[in-house]
Image (cartoon, rainbow, N blue to C red):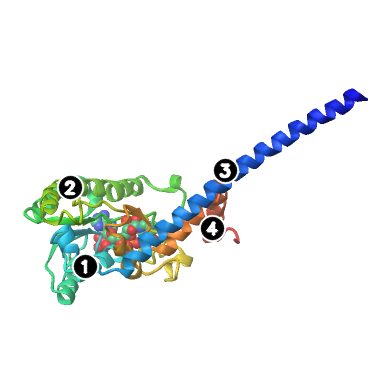
Amino acid sequence: MERHVLEKGEIGRSCSCFIETLALIGAFYTAKTCFTILSDTYTLIRVHFIPRLVKRADLVKLYGKWAIVTGCTSGVGKAYAKELASHGVNIILISRNKEKLEAVAKELVDSYKIETAVIVADFSKGREIYSVIEKALMGKEIGILVNNAGVFYPHLDCFTSLTKPNIWELIDVNIGAASMMLHMVLPGMDYLDYLSQALYYEYAPKGIFVQTLLPGFVSTKMIKFIDVFSKESFLSPSAEEYVHHAITTLGISRRTTGYWPHTILLMLGNYVPEWLWAWGMNRAAAYLHGTKTL
Ligand SMILES: NC(=O)c1ccc[n+]([C@@H]2O[C@H](COP(=O)([O-])OP(=O)(O)OC[C@H]3O[C@@H](n4cnc5c(N)ncnc54)[C@H](OP(=O)(O)O)[C@@H]3O)[C@@H](O)[C@H]2O)c1
């Protein structure tokens, strides 16, 4: 009987020790989650809201006279070209279609009285085009490079359903062009770095600000096959609305969605387990293919 009572006491002590350890782990986890939420909220306010309250930055003074915008004849690229031009920055426009490029250039010159230069280049054609671009850029003081040209799947599908030419186009335009343009433009920016440090040391210690924009859905022709997001809405804004927000994060955040509702979505996404995301995305894809209801 006595032994039985002793064993019971021992089990009770082990259980309470186990429960205390679990409570401690729970407390640590809760504290870590609270800290992450607070820090994310601070980032959201610092990147997306505070810059909109202060005076418009003088981009020419901060980065120089010229900006390159690739993929500038429609969507996000065109909106970027317009927004930068509205700040008085001269724009070098790069895309495939000469007529569309000249139409955008005229619109910018007429509306914002800036200078423009047009370069016709198809990034999907591989390495030959870069010597043409390099020649056209000679002598220009490039301060901003908007590496925007991009292609997406021709329709919503699995990776293995893409054709080989589709994959090469994705590599050449989305990866090749971005890398080659940086390689071409960065050394010039090093020079600007030196110059801007001397002149505007107080504004930008390095003079070069590399920003990665990771937007959610933006209502442009690229996503026209996704009914839900191709229409303009709070979650899939027009390119102009998107860029209007994104440009205020320049010089403030190195890596951002550029648009605060997208940042909130991303933050929420961080709290959803990966398997749940994957499940949700598969359901959404099946819905968009018309094979399932959500
Ligand atoms: N829309 C979204 O929801 C979304 C979301 C996340 C990221 N993005 C990214 O944002 C960027 C812009 O997308 P968007 O929605 O504005 O696309 P978009 O409206 O389809 O515009 C794409 C631009 O890229 C140019 N372009 C396409 N292929 C080219 C090539 N081979 N060589 C040179 N230029 C080429 C097009 O010009 P021409 O046809 O005149 O050559 C056009 O100006 C892309 O990098 C995309 O991946 C978009």
Question: Which is more N-terminal, label 2 or label 4?
Answer: 2
Percent from the top left, x then y, of residue 117? 12, 63
Residue type, mark 1 in image: Lys
Percent from the top left, x then y, of residue 154? 39, 56
Q: Is mark 1 within 8 Å of ligand 1?
A: yes
Q: Nearer the viewer, mark 3 or mark 2?
A: 3
Characterize the local packing of mark 2: few (<14), some (14-19) or many (20 or more) Cα atoms within 10 angstroms.
some
Q: Give the image quadrant in which the ligand numbered 1 is located.
A: bottom left
Residue 216 location, quadrant: bottom left
Question: Marks 1 and 2: in contact by CB < 8 Å?
Answer: no
Q: Nearer the viewer, mark 1 or mark 4?
A: 4
Task: Name the residue located 16 percent from the left edge and 56 percent from the top edge.
Answer: 143
Q: What SS does tag 4 mark?
A: helix
Question: Which is more N-terminal, label 1 or label 3?
Answer: 3
Q: Where 151 falls versus 228 (above or below)?
A: above
Q: What SS does tag 2 mark?
A: helix
Q: Is mark 4 within 8 Å of ligand 1?
A: no
Q: Left or right? Give the position of 261 relative to 81.
A: right
The residue carrying mark 4 is 284
Image quadrant holding the N terminus, namely: top right
Image quadrant holding the C terminus, namely: bottom right
Q: Which mark is residue 146?
A: none
Question: Which is more N-terminal, label 2 or label 3?
Answer: 3
Residue, far top: 3
Percent from the top left, x then y, of residue 292? 59, 59
Q: Is residue 84 visible?
A: yes
Q: Nearer the viewer, mark 3 or mark 1?
A: 3
Give the Cα separation between the discs numbered 3 and 4. Answer: 35 Å
Question: Which is more N-terminal, label 4 or label 3?
Answer: 3
The residue carrying mark 3 is 28
Q: Is mark 3 within 8 Å of ligand 1?
A: no
Q: Which mark is residue 100?
A: 1
